[in-house]
Image (cartoon, helix red, strand yellow):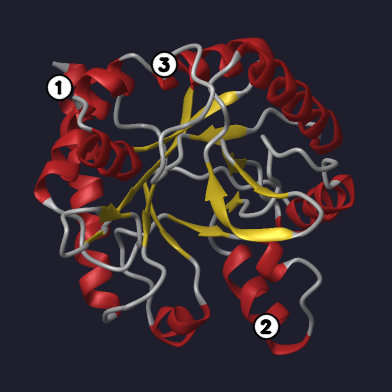
Amino acid sequence: MHPRHAHGAGLGFRRELIAPLQAKVPDAIRFFEIAPENWAGMGGRSARDLRHFTERYPFVCHGLSLSLGGPGRLDEALLRRIKSFMAEHGMTLYTEHLSWCADDSHLYDLLPIPLSGEAVRWTVERIQRAQDILGRRIGIENASYYVAPPGAEMSEAEFISAIVREADCLLHLDVNNIYVNSRNFGFDPLAFMHALPLEQTCYVHVAGHFVEPDGLLVDTHGAGVIDPVWSLLEAAYARIGGEVPTCLERDFNIPDLSALAAEVEQIARLQQAAGQRKAA
């Protein structure tokens, strides 16, 4: 299939949304994001439904289980399936979490990587191998976490910057993850964001989260985006511009498509405003 490059504002592609999206895709949605682990190799109606959309819209592949910082062997078979899946559907961008989630088996959680020079070298080697197999640079996403990263020899921003530089990969910026971590660990989200290698940003996530009774924020993707996260996204666009494709994540408590479209429209408005400021 002819490659399609994501641009503008997008939405995560979920089975619950297929029927309303087949009826009408809101104008603000310019692309979709998909987890390849959930769709690669799928046949039957699911495959036909996916093809209906990939023939009409760009898609971004966002991985869930590569475990780039993990101790287990890199899943090269998964990477080859992803490469084939992306080629089949004309997808050009693949991103993954800068975290680990597996050893001998999957742990079904995204865990922080030790902030050490050794971990930088280990993770860089795995990212480079992933890029060699996929034949493209990938984006790495700053992750949310709920225990302080162990073995810290540097700040998280320094760690991310070192990996992006040494692996020659790209940055997948998640503004909600920054906000969640900043509240849980007491740091300035704006200062943290500006310390990242934002010039290498290829993709952006925005999402909602849940606040536990004790005040802990959990990155659930199950609620609407709140004002401080929108403000952080606006500040990101002031640095990176509004051209970077940005996806609204919503993984459960799925509202009507009209409610999701309203948030995607907010992304598009912020992108347009950033473009106007740049042109002024």
Query: How many marks on residues?
Result: 3
What x and y, as percent, mark residue 148? 41, 34
Secondary element type, mark 1? helix
* Label 2 sits on residue: 46
Q: Is residue 167 visible?
A: yes
What x and y, as percent, mark residue 201? 45, 26
Residue 48 located left or right of residue 99: right
Secondary element type, mark 2? helix
The answer to whether the residues at label 3 and label 1 have Cβ atoms under 8 Å apart is no
Residue 226 located left or right of residue 174: left
Residue that appears at 36% across and 65% down? 250
Q: Nearer the viewer, mark 3 or mark 1?
A: 3
User: Real-space Cα distance between discs 1 and 2?
Assistant: 42 Å
* Label 1 sits on residue: 277
Q: Nearer the viewer, residue 144 or 48?
A: 144
Residue 151, by quadrant, is top right
**Please, is residue 124 above or below residue 243 in the view?**
above
| Quarter of the picture holding the C terminus | top left
